Image (cartoon, rainbow, N blue to C red):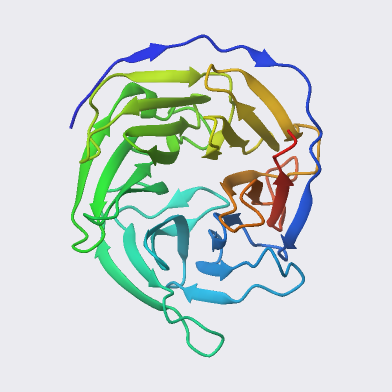
Amino acid sequence: MVVLSAIRTSSSPVPGALNANLQTVHQFPNLNWIENMILATDLSAGEIYLVDPQNPHLGPPVVAQFPKGSCVLGIAEVQDDVFYTQTIVGDVYTFIFQPNTSAFWEVDMRNYSEKTPAKVRKIADLPAIGVPNGMTLLSKDEGTVLTADSTRGLIWRINVHTGISEVVFDDPTLKAIASADPPFGVNGVHAVDSVLYFTSYNQALIAKLPISREGRPTGPVTVISSDVPAADDFAIDGHGNIWLTENVRNTLVRVSPEGQVQTIAGGPNSTALIGPVSAVFGRGPHDHGTLYISTDGLTVSTSGEVLTSNGKIAAIDTKSL
């Protein structure tokens, strides 16, 4: 476990939203808190859906169902059509999770069809992880992923074959603020070559650091921007721009490599994106410039009662932005 200090760079917000044209790929019914695409994990129902952006009117089938009470968080593809995800027992609407209930799962889609379900198996229980969140592939050859622990403020490496887990990074930038609601620190994580990018939800930052093949830091943290409130998950384009979801601010922003922040869609007073939580670029020949955004659709009353949670998956063509 390595603890490093942060080096901060300047961050200057760029005013004005681009009012990008959002298209709804699929609207889920109420009480569906959707994260991750195009295999969409449902935090509230313990399910994974297969969403086809080319057929938005087709109801997405459930390809994996986890034990009752499970919240599904984070997903990464380690081999072609073989995915790994995490669960914890709890209630996403109150952010009350049962201690020592985190688990790590394999979802094998290689033989999946309408008649042949995905193969789902538990790899390991991970009781030491507080609340698992974002996940990213570290090494396909070695079968390793990195996962964010939002409540303990740690990044873990997990071997997908053995389920063995180890803390590889601990730093003040990963920590939650105890008085915040919810008290969440590190959230989204993405490894690109030998650089790990991560968001810290309570600290409103997006940062990066160099890492080794084992996922350990080889240099200090650089904070790209500390002006991204409620920073959730994100995607990185070929120019190094970070397309980041700001969850309770209902906003999608683009953060330049220099730390400039520009609103792309939504906003605190907008209903275009209610609770965006995740973003990913398409991988097909016709949608590699399309950014898909998943939302939780969460609205609450003044007393805190949940009114709606009808998540959706939306799309934006970023090529002209």
- Residue 154 as seen in the image, left or right of residue 43: left
Tell me where residue 248 sits by quadrant: top right
The image shows residue 168 at horizontal and vertical percentages of: 22, 37
| Rendered view: 107 above or below 284 | below
Q: Is residue 54 visible?
A: yes
Q: Is 307 or 237 nearer to us in this picture?
A: 237
Viewer-proximal residue, 243 or 100? 243
- Quarter residue 27 falls in: bottom right
Q: Residue at x 41, y 76 (%)?
A: 110
Q: Position of residue 154 (x, y in %)?
A: 31, 36
- The image shows residue 59, relative to residue 296, as above or below, that is below
Q: Quadrant of the N terminus?
A: top left
Farthest-out residue, top: 10
Question: Horizontally, is 88 left or right of 20 in the view?
Answer: left
Answer left or right for 59 relative to 238: right
Q: Is residue 299 visible?
A: no
Q: Residue at x 58, y 48 (%)?
A: 281
Is 121 on the left or on the right of 216, as rendered?
A: right
